[in-house]
Image: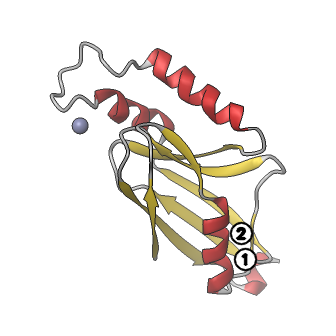
Amino acid sequence: METCTIKSKDREAFIDVTSRIQEIITASGMQTGTCVLHVPHTTAAITVNEGADPSVASDILAYLAERVPHRGPYRHGEGNSDAHIKSTLVGVSQVLPVERGKLVLGTWQSIFFCEFDGPRSRRLHVQLVSHGEALGK
Ligand code: ZN
């Protein structure tokens, strides 16, 4: 398993990690298999959505901020309850297919690490499960 370090610069951000994940797959030499992505944090997440127009990521963050305000009548005392809720809504894992050594993504899709309580240094685990050449055909 590989672990990426992700440094966020703002409290909330969608950070495109597609090329970093693809580099790990390329370096592994895996042709056919499954890429498991896991965020080991309770106030961050990972998702797949449009990477071509950055307005989409901004709109999603704005949507979440409106529904889950930073300051609310929360019981958790750390002041980051909204980030915990957003992490659960978006999810901490993604599973993506790999074919011919490439992530299988739609034309407009990118993989985003979602920061909800930054800035801080985060980790993203990448586990590659090779299905073998014969099985993949
Ligand atoms: Zn907390």
**Amino acid type of the residue tagged 1 in the rendering:** Thr
On screen, 63 above or below 30?
above
Give the CA separation, mark 1 to mark 2: 5 Å
Asked if the residues shown at circle 1 and circle 2 are in contact, with their CB atoms under 8 angstroms apart, the answer is yes
Front-most of residues 85 and 60: 60
Q: Position of residue 56 (x, y in %)?
A: 69, 32
Identify the residue under disc 1: 32
Q: Is residue 74 left or right of residue 15?
A: left
Amino acid type of the residue tagged 2 in the rendering: Val
Give the quarter the ligand 1 occupies. top left
Residue 3 in the image: above or below residue 95: below
Decide if residue 118 is on the left or right side of residue 47.
Answer: left
Q: Residues within 10 Å of mark 2 (few under 14, many from 20)?
A: many
The circle drawn on residue 126 is none
- Residue 10: image quadrant is top left
Question: Callout 1: 10 Å neighbours few (<14), some, many (20+)?
Answer: many
User: Residue tagged by mark 2?
Assistant: 98
Element under disc 2 = strand
Residue 49, how many percent across, how many down?
68, 42
Q: Which of marks 1 and 2 is nearer the N terminus?
A: 1
As rendered, which of 19 and 92 lies closer to the eye? 19
